[in-house]
Image (cartoon, rainbow, N blue to C red):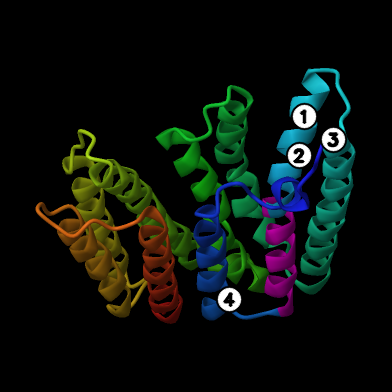
Amino acid sequence: MSVSIKSVAMPAQHGGWGFLIEPLLIGLIAAPSWGGVGLVIAAFGVFLMHQPLKITFKDWRKRRRYARTRLAERFVMLYGVMALGGFVIALAAADSAFVIPLVLAVPFALVQLAYEGRNEARESLPEISGALAFASTAAAIPLMSGAQLLIPAFALWIAAAARVIPSILYVRTRLRLEADRPFDPAPPLIAHAAALILVLMLIAAQLLTPLALIGSLVLLIRAAFGMLRPRRPTPAKVIGFREIAYGLLYAVLTGLSTV
């Protein structure tokens, strides 16, 4: 049985990279620290571990051991050491308050894992749950300076959620449009409008500066124009790369908008 190292060691879906990197970037821009660097390492380890761990559990359930099983087990150990090492660095260099949002994110991660076990990971709920779990890092990094930053830190988690939920709904709808399948533009547009209102509330509460509003407006405009018909067909990869660019812009503006 021929085994591709890439298929075992790397995530099958590359779209999740943005939802991993964006909250980490928000947190590091808002509150740079060595503990934050450690958490970045840990988050990448956990994210990379997902693919080989899924393969390992799948083969174990079948009570079969293939060449890919042994390779996947090795990568699970490698990424596990990476995640543990990063977490140890974070614990050694930061206030332990940063674990609060990570613990609160566990239910979101469990929802995604539950759907993974049923081979339904591409449904909206597990995608959103997984993204929200990683979004907790936007709050965890500022909390490395102490629990006194609890409210501003959680404002960043909310801001990260205001990016991931509407964007997941938009991309799913946009791909249906590109495939000439029935689609409903209302859910993603309503979600983007709600996210914009949420960001405005954070600004009104003086938890973010008006700079954060720019990112939400850009996302709302791109969603509105992205679902217009007629329009020029766009490959899925192009849509994905554009989303990464939009996400990075949003993350930078949000990180810079901390009060």
Q: How far apart are marks 4 and 3 (CA)?
A: 36 Å
Residue that badge 1 annotates: 57
As drawn, is 164 to the left or to the right of 36?
left
Residue 246 screen position, x and y as percent: 36, 69
Residue 252 screen position, x and y as percent: 44, 77
Residue 126 screen position, x and y as percent: 50, 36
Q: Nearer the viewer, mark 2 or mark 3?
A: 3
Residue that badge 4 annotates: 28
Residue 101 screen position, x and y as percent: 59, 53
State the predominant SS element of the stretch in magenta.
helix
Residue 107: image tag: none
Residue 204 visible here = no
Kind of residue indicated by mark 2 = Leu
User: Was residue 176 drawn as part of the magenta stretch in this picture?
Assistant: no
Q: Which residue is drawn at the image coordinates 50% and 61% (left, top)?
A: 18
Residue 69: image tag: 3
Q: Which residue is drawn at the image coordinates 22% and 41% (left, top)?
A: 187
Q: Which of marks 3 and 1 is nearer the N terminus?
A: 1
Residue that badge 2 annotates: 53
The magenta stretch is 34-47
Kind of residue indicated by mark 1 = Phe
Q: Which of marks 4 and 3 is in front?
A: 3
Q: Which residue is drawn at the image coordinates 80% and 40% (left, top)?
A: 2
